[in-house]
Amino acid sequence: MEIYSGIIKNWQIHNYDTDFQVLTGTVVVDNKGRWQPGMHMRSSKIERIVDDLVYTRNSIYLLEGEQGDTVLGGGDWGHKIAGVHY
């Protein structure tokens, strides 16, 4: 049984403030059926990160490859990430 909700590549952790981080990236697989492969996504608030797993309130994402969101141009967008909506 897979423990993750989805697999994300070309990912980036964004530090909105000291207590608020979100994940963006390109969807490889979404086991919850929210996104199709190849779509770009933004998570809700990250609760914790353990190795290559990112935990949010309702999902666990498996990170594939190295950090660097190619859609957003790479790098931490900080509080500006709040303006990215899907």
Image (cartoon, helix red, strand yellow):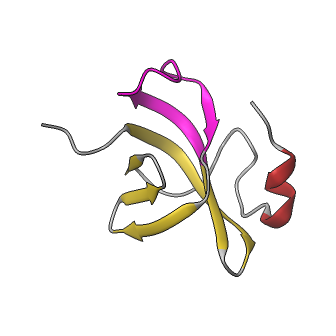
In this rendering, the answer to whether 45 lies above or below 39 is below
Residue at the far front: name it.
Answer: 57
**Is residue 69 part of the magenta span, yes or no?**
no
* Highlighted magenta segment, given as a residue range: 24-42
The x and y percentages for residue 63 are: 40, 50
In the image: residue 62, left or right of residue 73: left
Residue at the far bottom: name it.
Answer: 18
* Point 34% across, 69% down: residue: 50
Frontmost residue, 58 versus 4: 58
* Point 38% across, 49% down: residue: 60
The x and y percentages for residue 38 are: 54, 23
* Point 87% across, 58% down: residue: 80
Quadrant in which the C terminus appears: top right
Frontmost residue, 82 versus 71: 82
In this rendering, the answer to whether 22 lies above or below 31 is below
In this rendering, the answer to whether 31 lies above or below 62 is above
In the image: residue 46, left or right of residue 49: right
Count of marks overlaid on the render: 0
In the image: residue 47, left or right of residue 73: left
The x and y percentages for residue 41 are: 62, 36
In the image: residue 23, left or right of residue 8: right
**Is residue 31 part of the magenta span, yes or no?**
yes
The x and y percentages for residue 75 are: 71, 61
* Point 87% across, 47% down: residue: 83
Q: Residue 1 is drawn in which quadrant?
A: top left
